[in-house]
Image: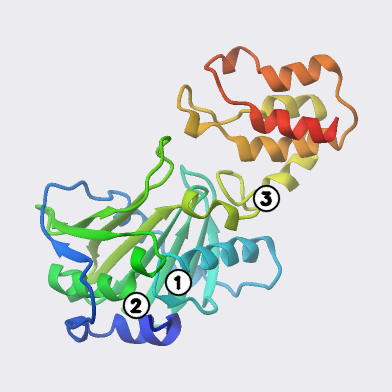
Amino acid sequence: MRKLNICTAVVMGLLSAAGSLAQTDGKRHVSVGRADLLGWRRLPDIVTRLDPKRLRPMPAGTWEAKNLDATIEAARAAFSFQFGEASGFYTVESPAGDVLVAEWGNNDPLRRVWLWDDPRSITFIFAGEPSLIEPGNLASFCERTIRWQDDSGIVKSLELGVLPSGDVVGNAVYPTNEIGALAWWLSTASVRGVGYLAIGMTKAFFGSTYPLGTLRVSERFPPLSSRLKIVGRAALFDEIGKGYKAPAMITYPGSRDEIVLEELTSRGSLSEPEISRIVLGDARFTFHVDRTVDIRFLSLHS
């Protein structure tokens, strides 16, 4: 499949004229069907937080750059084009944790692609003419923009549905797992005369791509590892398992624990009672939580 450059083909081309997307070669993966689909309700809220005035250049080699590089690498399996250098970035806090916001494009609000990168998922938001999110044009846009399973992508097929509000949402066929960590979504919104298309997915699809501290860790900017340097040794034990919402296994913060344990073991040897507390947990963790991350880590650092 032909590779496109994000700065020229997507921002300056694909978003410029939805009508030019009417034809596509090969197998069709997108259909327009049911409207009884749930919309991604967060999109309008996120759009209001996309602020071009806050964008600043991304310095090479920084912690933020490592986060962005991992997401750009993950995007290779999600889209049929290559992401070039971002125009700028900034970070914000959200209920889901620290978010990295990046943008590709230029000064025209109708020629932009935004990234909303939170601890568990990545969402790319395409901004264009309102005609972009009309069902027919959107189907053609998605056909060309998404990398499909028959081209080593994530999604096998996509069904678009129109909600009573006029917004379009997508019901995709993609791989799943038993714990429900894999998810993919599509949603649109029209805000102040601009059509926004959000295509998002959980980072669980690309787990090995992300370095420790960038995935399923809420405190990312600055990174948790640097924040823990000023936390007392005794208080570090209270950080283990922080954020777990029982009894769902998927919410257990194993990646976060690994960072906490790295800091804890750097402060000196652990006593047997301390090891027991870490491995077995206390009254807060009596929900058959899998502590294999803790046990594996301690076996390497005891």
Write the residue at 13% across / 72% down: 136
Callouts 1 and 2 close, C-beta under 8 Å: yes
Image coordinates for residue 66, horizontal then vertical, percent: 64, 63
Viewer-closest of 227 and 139: 139
Callouts 1 and 3 close, C-beta under 8 Å: no
- Could you say whether the residue bearing mark 3 is in a helix, strand or loop? loop
On the image, numbered disc 3 is attached to which residue? 223
Viewer-closest of 245 and 101: 245
Image: 68 above or below 145: above
Write the residue at 55% across / 51% down: 207
Amino acid type, label 2: Pro
Tell me the mark number nearer the camera, choosing from 3 and 2. 3
- Could you say whether the residue bearing mark 2 is in a helix, strand or loop? loop
Image: 97 above or below 91: above
Sequence order check, earlier mark of 1 and 2: 1
Q: Quadrant of residue 195?
A: bottom left
Q: CA distance from mark 1 to mark 2?
A: 9 Å
Amino acid type, label 1: Pro
* Residue 148 seen: no
Q: CA distance from mark 1 to mark 3?
A: 24 Å
Sequence order check, earlier mark of 3 and 2: 2
Q: Quadrant of the N terminus?
A: bottom left
The tag on residue 52 is 1
Image coordinates for residue 112, horizontal then vertical, percent: 38, 76
Viewer-closest of 95 and 201: 201
Left or right of 202, for residue 298: right
On the image, numbered disc 2 is attached to which residue? 109
Amino acid type, label 3: Pro
